[in-house]
Image (spheres, helix red, strand yellow):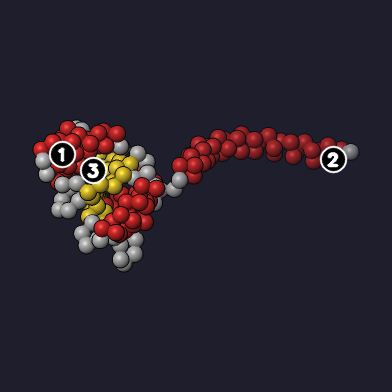
Amino acid sequence: MQKEKKTENINKFSELLADKEFVVSTTYQGVSSQALAQVRWTLASAGVEYHIIKNTLVCLAAEQAKRPGLVEIVEGPTALGFATDAVEAAKAIRQQTRGRDSLIQIRGGLLGNRVLAATEVMAIADLPPRDVLIAQLAAQLQAPVSRLHRALSWPLQGLRNVLQARVEQLA
């Protein structure tokens, strides 16, 4: 590869690293070019840019983008997936790794500057959608308030019942 082309690739990937919050490292050994094109197309529909890149260029781009943790998950033939939404990207990549004839294997990920193991990337894929997480949080925040309301209203409810029984007794 010519020096200008290498410099262009390094700049391209360092921009991707700077723009995208989530990066996942995968292997692609034994995958045909047609199958790899299908993987790229599927991942692109989920918002994941999937690129095969030389490890030395990855190291230089990671250094330039000030994300040195990426070097820890790059080893051997590597393809990187770049995404803004970590959950959707992890789900899309997990879909490609399922089954006995899976096309790619996850090596690890990089979320911000935190290096993730392959199991942690899979755990991100298991997260519920954002709306469900917000609903669960709202329920958790509401629970103490409703318990306080019940605790404060029970004595008043008991007093009301006693007074109502006394009114019926006198009538």
In what element is the residue under mark 2?
Answer: helix
Q: Earlier in the sequence, mark 1 or mark 2?
A: 1
Label 1 sits on residue: 5
What amino acid does circle 1 point to? Answer: Lys
Q: CA distance from mark 1 to mark 2?
A: 93 Å
Label 3 sits on residue: 115
Which image quadrant: the N terminus?
A: top left
What amino acid does circle 3 point to? Answer: Val
**Tag of residue 155:** none
In what element is the residue under mark 3?
Answer: strand
Question: Which quadrant holds residue 15?
Answer: top left
Image x and y of residue 84, in percent: 35, 39
Image x and y of residue 168, in percent: 85, 40
Label 2 sits on residue: 168
Q: CA distance from mark 3 to mark 1?
A: 29 Å
Q: Is residue 116 visible?
A: no
Q: CA distance from mark 2 to mark 3?
A: 71 Å
